[in-house]
Image (cartoon, rainbow, N blue to C red):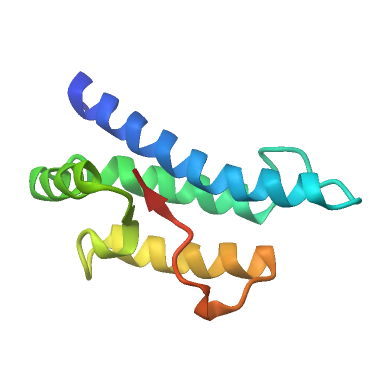
Amino acid sequence: MSTRTYRLALIALSAVAATLAYPTAVAAHSRADAAPPAGSGPIAGTTENLAREVARSLTDRATRDRTMSAVAAGPVDLATIAPGNALSRTASVGNDAVLAAKGLPATSGSLLRSR
């Protein structure tokens, strides 16, 4: 993987992690019972799987160009960047898992966004 692709993947992964971590941290802070430590549990596993798929997807020039254009315009749902590809499927499945882990209804919309 080239240095440029690696940097792009790292940026995308950081954005995904930050997007997922913030709502979890706010919810944990507002509850009396503390959340599990960072890096454990179903949300961390989902984030790691998605991060790997984002990195893999960014090796494809067309997907990378679409992703960079979409992210430059603002936060984007990872499931909509390239409908029908592995990234889209991984993001959809991951979003369902995160919603369930947070106890949110399936109709809540996508939590897995990149910016």
Residue 99 drawn at (x, y percent): 59, 67
Please tell me in which quadrant of the rendered image residue 40 appears: top right
Q: Is residue 71 visible?
A: yes
Q: Is residue 2 visible?
A: no
In the image, is 7 to the left or to the right of 65? right
In this rendering, is residue 48 above or below 113? above
In this rendering, is residue 17 above or below 111? above
Residue 58 drawn at (x, y percent): 22, 42
**Extreme residue toward the right, this view:** 32
Q: Nearer the viewer, residue 73 or 53?
A: 73
Q: Quadrant of the C terminus?
A: top left
In the image, is 58 to the left or to the right of 24? left
Residue 14 drawn at (x, y percent): 43, 34
Q: Residue at x 78, y 44 (%)?
A: 29
Q: Nearer the viewer, residue 73 or 37?
A: 73
Q: Residue at x 44, y 44 (%)?
A: 16
Q: Residue at x 22, y 27 (%)?
A: 1
Q: Residue at x 85, y 46 (%)?
A: 34
Count the labels in the image: 0
**Extreme residue toward the top, this view:** 3
Residue 17 drawn at (x, y percent): 50, 40
